[in-house]
Amino acid sequence: MKRKIILNLAISIDGYIASEDGGFDWIVGDGDNSLNSDKKWDFNEFLSEVDTVVMGKKCYDQNFHNDYKSKKVYVATSKELEDYENIHFINGDICKVIEEERKKEGKNIFLFGGGKLVDNFIKADIIDEYIIGIIPTILGKGRPLFLGNNPKIDLHLDEYISDNGIVILRYSKR
């Protein structure tokens, strides 16, 4: 089976993935479980189907890579940095590197973020699935998911989950 590149992240209702300083403490539900769906989102199950994580340098600098010690982690950066342990720094065309990685045997590839990194993958139209958790918050400002000038990409809604005011939508390309 072909490995998928899967974007999985949370956004505010107004489209931000982090506050201006990279904060994410706002990524919480509203405390109301009255509209919860029977199915729940299981992040650990999602991670069990992934063996590669791709993130930008800002996410790396916030130590998100430490959550993925058992996975191969690619970090997009404009600097020349030395790989170590499970961390592979990519200074260049990250999409090309991940497309090559996708051809190898393995599990799915988790496109972690942030916005600048994801923008490359959206513009190259190589994301197979979009899993978006919509947080019941209007941030007003921050780091946007979509940076503009994207190709038109038609999606199919495969699944939705409602949990504590957060709606998780899973789309695939059609």
Image (cartoon, rainbow, N blue to C red):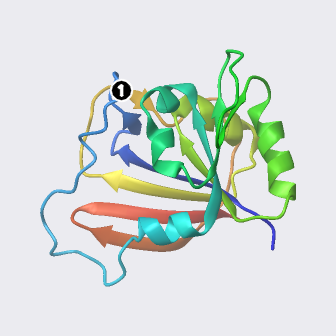
User: Which residue is depicted at the point 29% across and 60% down?
Assistant: 166
Relative placement, left or right, of 139 versus 77 is left
Residue 62, horizontal then vertical, whole percent: 42, 30
User: Which residue is depicted at the point 34% across and 63% down?
Assistant: 167
Point out the residue furthest to the top here. Answer: 79
Q: Nearer the viewer, residue 134 or 19?
A: 19
Give the secondary structure at mark 1.
loop
- Say if residue 37 shows up in the picture: yes
From the viewer's perspective, is residue 165 above or below residue 75?
A: below
Residue 160, horizontal then vertical, whole percent: 43, 71
Q: Quadrant of the C terminus?
A: bottom right
Q: Nearer the viewer, residue 85 or 158?
A: 85
Relative placement, left or right, of 2 versus 107 is right
Residue 112, horizontal then vertical, whole percent: 54, 45
Residue 105, horizontal then vertical, whole percent: 83, 64
The disc labelled 1 sits on which kind of residue? Gly
Q: Residues within 10 Å of mark 1 (few under 14, many from 20)?
A: some
Point out the residue furthest to the front here. Answer: 85
From the viewer's perspective, is residue 53 above or below residue 145?
A: below
Point out the residue furthest to the bottom here. Answer: 38
Relative placement, left or right, of 39 versus 128 is left
Q: Quadrant of the N terminus?
A: bottom right
Give the residue number, with chain letter if any, for mark 1.
142
